[in-house]
Image (spheres, rainbow, N blue to C red):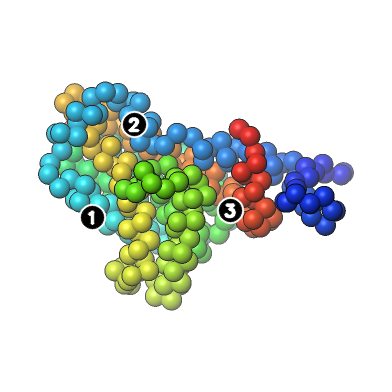
Amino acid sequence: MRISKAIVRIDSAKTESDLLEFSVADLDDLKKAKTRLERPSLTAKIAGLVGRPIEAGFKLLPKNWNQKVGKVTEAALLKGLDLSIRTMGKRETRQAHDWLHKAVVTGSGMAAGAVGPYSLFVELPFATGVMLRSIAEIARSEGHDVSLVQTKLECLEVLALGGKGAEDDSVETGYWSVRGALAKSVSEAATHLAQKGLTDKGAPPLARLVAAIASRFGGVVTEEAVAIAIPIVGAVSGGAINYLFMNHFQEMARGHFVVKRLEKKYGRALVEKTYSDLVI
């Protein structure tokens, strides 16, 4: 049977040598991935859930809160990466258990919401580990080898998608911009982990990557803290916000690892250009 193809032009020239074939199925997958990756940021979703009270919630947080969240977030990312490396070593493709992971973090979020913002320092490492496990399962379901260091770091990279970093007012925050900003750090960290593993967690290459991701992921963690700091709202929305967290990063992971799969087949340049040209 002849498989239909969608022809994608990679530049303005019209010679036959300047054309590559993108299958209709792969083009559809890329369009779905773009739809996922270009959704509103997680901070916008949290604000939409909680509404106006979230502005008042910032006043309820302790002093130096952002600094404390930053340190806890970096530690949570390292622990989550360690968990991923230790427990996701099987290569075969399997279906991801999205709803199971949603249920687990929703329950932990409800408990955190009932206690208050300081509960995040206990709940965040646990929830981050569950999220990274879910992201790794999604990567595996898309055919990626989760035993590879590069794949594990790409799982960590997902947590930088859809959040806002400290410098986001002056830079682009789209999917390709975030990947471009992290590319060097991911490469250096991959080289370090391949040589030494996680024995030296404070090594500059790994520390730079974790700090870069934490600066973005920590932003949405602060939004969660603000929400659960609000009396009554916190107890109600803690679980809902964690559900948003998990659902958002599962969607980001599906889009990201579809793009990575297609890059292996067509090359990054063609995939990036085709992604940019797609209308959603």
Residue located at (65% from left, 41% from top): 277
Horizontal placement of 71 versus 41: left or right? left
Q: Which quadrant would residue 208 be assigned to in this image?
A: bottom left
Dot 1 or dot 2: first in sequence order is 2
Identify whether 271 is placed above or below 278.
below
93 and 52: which is toward the camera: 52
Residue carrying label 2: 46
Residue 168 position, x and y percent, is 37, 45
Residue carrying label 3: 260
Q: Which mark is residue 19?
A: none
130 and 206: which is toward the camera: 206
For the residues labelled 1 and 2, the Cα–Cα distance comes to: 22 Å
Could you say whether the residue bearing mark 3 is in a helix, strand or loop?
helix
Residue 105 position, x and y percent, is 34, 39
Dot 3 or dot 1: first in sequence order is 1
Residue located at (31% from left, 48% from top): 166
Dot 3 or dot 2: first in sequence order is 2
Residue carrying label 1: 71
What amino acid is at disc 2? Ile
Horizontal placement of 157 versus 77: left or right? right
Could you say whether the residue bearing mark 2 is in a helix, strand or loop?
helix
Could you say whether the residue bearing mark 1 is in a helix, strand or loop?
helix
